[in-house]
């Protein structure tokens, strides 16, 4: 069972991640593509449920947080890897002209990394430690 402070920190972090993913995909992206929309909607819903579960101390909160973190980590690793590969491809194929697009993609990957790779990893480790202590 998570301590009150850890549940508060991770609950708020999950809600902020949900807001960031939702705004980033459904507001900031100019075009819709269903694979991205489905993953973003699923991740947003899971993160909101995890945040609410942790903040309210619900019995299911830690299980949902574990699942949300696993989904976020998988989707985040895939997204950051694809952004990095696409940035390198743009730069390699189009040279200086593709450099601008590569910089934008690298920036997006760098901005996404803490929220969809680092945070879920830390949360999974923390939840695993609290699970083994109980």
Image: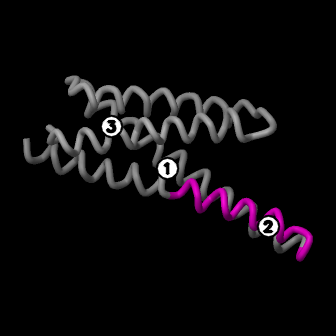
Measured from the top left, where is residue 43 in percent x and y? 51, 34
**For the residues bearing labels 1 and 3, Cβ distance under 8 angstroms:** no
Q: Earlier in the sequence, mark 1 or mark 3?
A: 3
Label 2 crowd bin: few (<14), some (14–19), many (20+), radius 10 Å: some
Q: Nearer the viewer, mark 1 or mark 3?
A: 3
Q: Against 123, is 26 above or below?
A: above
Q: Earlier in the sequence, mark 1 or mark 2?
A: 2
Q: Secondary structure at mark 2?
A: helix
**Numbered badge on residue 67:** none
Using the rendered view, name the quadrant where residue 90 is placed: bottom right
Label 2 to label 3, Cα distance in Å?
A: 38 Å
Label 1 crowd bin: few (<14), some (14–19), many (20+), radius 10 Å: many
Measured from the top left, where is residue 64 in percent x and y? 33, 30
**Numbered badge on residue 11:** 3
Main SS, magenta residues: helix
User: Viewer-proximal residue, 113 or 124?
Assistant: 113
Q: Secondary structure at mark 1?
A: helix
Q: Residue at x 14, y 37 (%)?
A: 1
**Numbered badge on residue 116:** 1
| Residue denoted by label 2 | 89
User: Viewer-proximal residue, 27 or 83?
Assistant: 27
Q: Earlier in the sequence, mark 2 or mark 3?
A: 3
Residues in magenta, as a range: 95-113
Label 1 to label 3, Cα distance in Å?
A: 15 Å
Measured from the top left, where is residue 7 in percent x and y? 24, 39
């Amino acid at each position: 069972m998570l301590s009150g402070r850890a549940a508060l920190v991770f609950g708020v972090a999950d809600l902020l991640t949900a807001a960031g993913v939702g705004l980033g995909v459904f507001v900031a992206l100019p075009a819709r593509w269903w694979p991205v929309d489905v993953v973003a909607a699923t991740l947003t819903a899971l993160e909101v449920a995890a945040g609410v579960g942790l903040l309210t101390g619900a019995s299911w909160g830690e299980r949902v947080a574990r699942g949300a973190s696993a989904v976020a980590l998988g989707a985040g690793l895939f997204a950051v890897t694809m952004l990095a590969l696409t940035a390198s491809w743009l730069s390699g194929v189009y040279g200086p002209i593709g450099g601008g697009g590569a910089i934008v993609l690298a920036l997006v990957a760098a901005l996404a990394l803490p929220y969809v790779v680092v945070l879920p990893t830390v949360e999974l480790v923390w939840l695993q430690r609290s699970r083994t202590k109980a």
